[in-house]
Image (tube, rainbow, N blue to C red):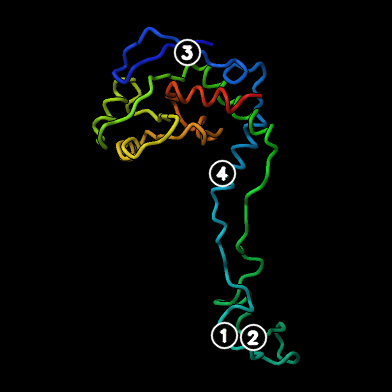
Amino acid sequence: MELSIYNIKGEDTGRKIVLDDAIFAIEKPNDHAIYLDVKQYLANQRQGTHKSKERSEISGSTRKLIRQKGGGGARRGDINSPVLVGGGRVFGPTPRDYSFKLNKKLKALARRSALTYKAQKQEIIVVENYDFAAPKTKDFIALTKALKVEGQKALFVVEALTDNLVLSSRNIRAARVMNAFQLNTYSVLDCKKLVLSEAAVAVINEQFKA
């Protein structure tokens, strides 16, 4: 698959770049692989620090409130009982790790599938390698306007992040910049336009080979 290469002014340079068909045009994209990879990504974002106090952790007297028999009511222990207001919680959440492992080949298949869908929808733009001389938000806004992705959810993928690029883009809510080595299925599918630098395409072609 060939795509035109644009400069940061949005002008067609007249050059073409080849996107590896084994990555951007696979025969059968696997939706279930995408589902599993996205599920793992989201699970890995969870802190898992949720916690509620159980009966033994409540600060309260352990004295038995009423006698065991003869009171005419239900048996009752101390004031920390879960059936009483202010008591402990039964089977409440406890800290846990939500992460799980996936086969490397499956994750690679998921990412190739996601990139294939992007290519099929013509939502990939390739730009010459670029950087900013200074951290200026207006320069990044000018780039989004030139590429006609202003206001859209766009993911800019470069070979290596620079401070100027990160600082220039961080105040743009709809845009996000990412290192090509960190590209994942969720990020690809979570954007409307995927803007790749020339060097990033080379990295992706090498990294996601079957």
Residue ID for mark 3? 17
Mark 4 and mark 2: Cα distance apart in space: 41 Å
* Residue beneath the point at 40% across and 36% down: 161
* Disc with the residue nearer the chain's start (4 vs 2): 4
Callout 3: few (<14), some (14-19), or many (20+) C-alpha neighbours within 10 Å?
some
| Circle 1 residues within 10 Å: few <14, some 14–19, many ≥20 | some
The three-letter code of the residue at mark 1 reads Gly
Q: Find residue 180 and report its horizontal and vertical position in percent.
A: 49, 31
Q: CA distance from mark 1 to mark 4?
A: 39 Å
Q: In this rendering, would 173 be left or right of 21?
A: left
Pointers 2 and 3 in contact (C-beta within 8 Å): no
Q: Which mark is residue 42?
A: 4
Badge 1 vs badge 4, beta-carbon distance below 8 Å: no
Residue that carries the numbered disc 1 in the rendered image: 60
User: Which quadrant of the view contains residue 110?
Assistant: top right
Image x and y of residue 63, in percent: 64, 91
Q: Which residue is mark 2?
A: 78
